[in-house]
Image: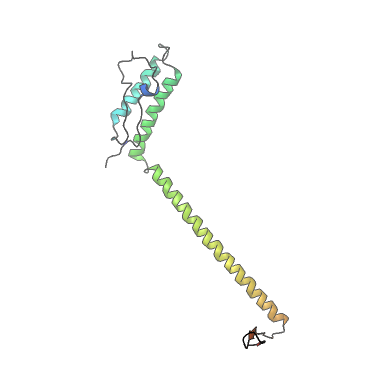
Amino acid sequence: MPPVYTHAIPSIQDVNPNIPAVLAQVDLNRRIAANSDLNRDDLRQAKIVAKTLSLNEAEDPLITRAIVESARLRAKALEDIHAQAEYGAGNINQILANIQQQLAQIGNDVQAVELQVRIGRAETANARIITRNFQLQGGLVLAPLQKTEADCCWQKA
């Protein structure tokens, strides 16, 4: 599957409707549809538009610094998309989703470990209490009382 533009990219004319139409040598209305195949002509044309607007900025008062910067940014965005498709590591949104999923799993693992640590601390505390009681009683092991008959008497088991 060939790489595609993941979102629509509006033309310079769409973004800056006040651009004068006297610049017939460049296509100011070249839009790029979402999910269309990457096309190096789109990139080349965007760079030509940016350069042409930059050169004509001083001569035409309708071509403002904002319009020139908008054209440069559009060309840079297209350049980045093409570079990412050719040399990049993949879809950044998918990479981010994978990282978030891994972080969630790590959080669950940490909670499970914390629970085991709490259980271990409780068991250790209980063992210390039993040892201390055993030492205080002089080695005498006491058995808990148990009922011998229903609602009657208690005695050692």
Residue 133 percent coordinates (x, y)? 69, 79
Instruction: Report the front residue among 86 and 19.
Output: 19
Instruction: Report the front residue among 30 and 80.
Output: 30
Could you tell me which residue is drawn at 42 percent across and 20 percent down? 67
80 sits left or right of 150 in the view: left
93 sits left or right of 142 in the view: left
Could you tell me which residue is drawn at 40 percent across and 43 percent down? 93
Q: Residue 114: which quarter of the image? A: bottom right
Residue 58 percent coordinates (x, y)? 42, 13
Q: Is residue 149 above or below residue 78?
A: below
Quarter the N terminus occupies: top left
Could you tell me which residue is drawn at 31 percent across and 32 percent down? 33
Residue 141 percent coordinates (x, y)? 67, 85
Quarter the C terminus occupies: bottom right
Q: Is residue 150 above or below residue 106?
A: below
Q: Is residue 156 above or below residue 55?
A: below
Give the colour scheme shown.
Answer: rainbow
Could you tell me which residue is drawn at 32 percent across and 34 percent down? 34
Q: Residue 10: which quarter of the image? A: top left
Q: Residue 149: which quarter of the image? A: bottom right
